Amino acid sequence: DSSDIVVDKSDEIFDKLLRFTRDKALSPTAFSTYVKCPLKFYFNVVERLRPEDELEESVDNMTFGNIFHEAADLLYSQIKGDAEPALRLAELRKRGEIDKCVDKAIAKIYFGDDDGILRHEFSGELLIIRNIVREYLGNNLLNYDICNNEFVVAETESDVKVTLPIEVGEEKFDIHLAGRADRIDSLNNGLLRVIDYKTGKPRLNYSGIESLFHGEPIATKRESNIINTLLYSMMLSHERGRDVRPELYYVGSMVRKDYSPKFIETIERKSRTLESYSEVATEFENEVKSTLKEMFDRSIPFMQCEDSSACKYCDYQTICNKK
């Protein structure tokens, strides 16, 4: 059994961390990495170590996800501000716009052609990806939005940010958080809605805000996707002064008749659907600030997470060697 790795925050290491108070911003993904494992955060975010043997499978999954995101952006940016999104989406589908958007996305993401013109022969694998993206976009996502059409697309691939002041002992820091939201809608009930597209298995349940930050087992309690989308909601509500509904569009599952992209919070067997960020804002922001205080506390080292079930798919297993 290996001894635990502990990385003290020397002046040199702390200075790297301070870039998030100067010219760089902490992304939601980086923040939720810290929540799951401070040591992984140190390797990945502070030192920017990139594992050499990243799994081919994860590269393929990433490529697939990136192609879908790009195709969705190309399609939905065409209906920005439109008061009748269902009609416009049906129209675009009829015109063959789905296939065009998917091919443009493949040209850009897979082949690096920014003009969006496909000039390459497809491998079998890419044909499969193309067909799945077409299905997810033109069937699952569009049908869901056409049936639930009380929204106007406000922005796609939109940058959101917030600066949070924190105090650690005598020191004061202004920490920048920023990310790019897949889609921001304006809902008919006056709320904004922030949507994150996901291509994996749906994970929309959580056991209360506290468990997102401290719950174990880490792999299933500290849901990164939920933390990230709540961070987008926080940034948006600060930036725009409007309440926000966070939603996760797990596009592979949106074909199900009972699919809902809303979060479900279950505490002591009592469940509720999260209708708006304001319902959890105070508790969530307290946890965010408390996490940032720990992150910027010179006396607290970067340590391995204690729950090894979270290490199963970690890119830094070989360095960390946690059993």
Image (cartoon, rainbow, N blue to C red):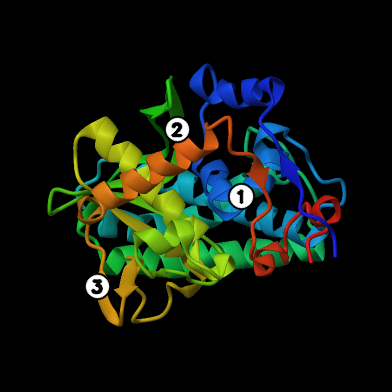
Vertical order, 273 against 156 (above or below): below
Q: What residue type is labelled 2?
A: Leu
Pointer 3: what residue? 272
Please say whether residue 96 is visible from this viewpoint: no
Which residue has dot 1 on it? 66
The residue lying toward the viewer, choosing from 94 and 4, is: 4
Q: Residue furthest top?
A: 22
Disc 1 marks a residue whose amino acid type is Asn
Q: How far apart are marks 2 and 1 (CA)?
A: 22 Å
**Closer to the N terminus: mark 1 or mark 3?**
1
Question: What element does badge 1 sit on?
Answer: helix
Q: Is residue 222 left or right of residue 133?
A: left
Residue 248, by quadrant, is bottom left
Name above or below for residue 87 compared with residue 165: below
Residue situated in front as seen by the camera: 16 or 301: 301
Residue at the disc numbered 2 = 177
Residue at the (61%, 49%) spot, across then down: 66
> Badge 2: how crowded within 10 Å, few (<14), some, or many (20+)?
many
Q: Which of pointers 1 and 3 indicates the residue nearer the eye?
A: 3
**Which residue is located at x 51 percent, y 66 percent?**
136
